[in-house]
């Protein structure tokens, strides 16, 4: 039974055939075991969502400036030397969860319902053949799960307004 956020994310990994990237139960926490490509993908996905938040709170120009600086880190070689400090990473991801929860509480955002709606949307990404579509790195970060034809956008407006979300696939909306 899926109950926690981690359980739901694990469900996503399993549905999209990404289980090989999950740490084994009881394994020591390690960024090295993840591998540089997976660490880079996760960092890019975190940054992408942060840029969306900046655009939502401030504006597109602010998000663009931050994204440009972020992309410059990779072209300037700043990220070539890695610390891979899993304790510091755990502190940062834990702190991010904490301050995001505070943001949601202060803004009156129903975080659990928003998460559930995003989870439902993410589970709708399978391709028409029932298999995941995974980016080759051409347009999106390599390894990112892409949207299939039955994908529906999370209806967060409905969630925020306390209404039943519309899960009509984007291709069928008028």
Image: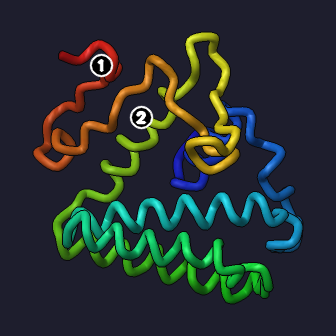
- Closer to the camera in the image, 134 or 15: 134
Residue 121 is marked as 2
State the SS at label 1: loop
Name of the residue lying farthest toward the left: 161
Residue 91 on image: x %, y %: 61, 86
Whether residue 20 sits left or right of residue 98 in the image: it is right
Q: Residue at x 50, y 30 (%)?
A: 147
- Closer to the camera in the image, 38 or 107: 38
Residue 156 on image: x %, y %: 24, 44
Question: To which quarter of the image does residue 12 belong?
Answer: top right
- Closer to the camera in the image, 17 or 148: 148
Q: Is residue 117 above or below residue 83?
A: above
Residue 127 on image: x %, y %: 58, 19
Whether residue 142 sits left or right of residue 47 in the image: it is right
State the SS at label 2: helix
Whether residue 141 sits left or right of residue 122 in the image: it is right
User: What colour scheme has been applied to the protein in the rendered image?
Assistant: rainbow
Q: Which residue is mark 1?
A: 168
Q: Quadrant of the image for the N terminus?
A: top right
The disc, 1 or 2, on the residue closer to the chain's N-terminal end is 2
Q: Residue at x 40, y 43 (%)?
A: 118
Whether residue 137 sits left or right of residue 55 in the image: it is right
Callout 1–callout 2 Cβ contact below 8 Å: no
How much space separates mark 1 and mark 2, taking CA atoms? 10 Å
The crowding category of the residue bearing disc 2, from other C-alpha atoms within 10 Å (few below 14, some 14 to 19, many at least 20), is some
Q: Residue at x 45, y 71 (%)?
A: 68
């Amino acid at each position: 039974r899926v109950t926690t956020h981690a359980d739901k994310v694990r469900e996503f990994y399993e549905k999209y055939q990404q289980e090989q990237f999950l740490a084994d139960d009881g394994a020591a926490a390690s960024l090295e075991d993840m591998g540089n490509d997976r660490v880079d993908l996760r960092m890019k996905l975190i940054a992408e969502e942060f840029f969306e938040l900046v655009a939502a709170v401030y504006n597109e120009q602010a998000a663009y400036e931050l994204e440009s600086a972020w992309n410059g880190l990779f072209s300037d070689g700043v990220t070539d030397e890695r610390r891979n400090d899993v304790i510091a990473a755990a502190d940062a991801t834990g702190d991010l969860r904490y301050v995001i929860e505070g943001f949601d509480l202060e803004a009156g955002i129903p975080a659990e319902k928003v998460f559930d709606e995003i989870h439902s949307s993410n589970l709708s990404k399978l391709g028409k053949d029932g298999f995941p579509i995974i980016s080759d790195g051409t347009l999106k970060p390599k390894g990112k799960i892409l949207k299939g034809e039955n994908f529906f956008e999370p209806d967060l407006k409905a969630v925020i307004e306390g209404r039943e979300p519309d899960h009509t696939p984007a291709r069928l909306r008028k």
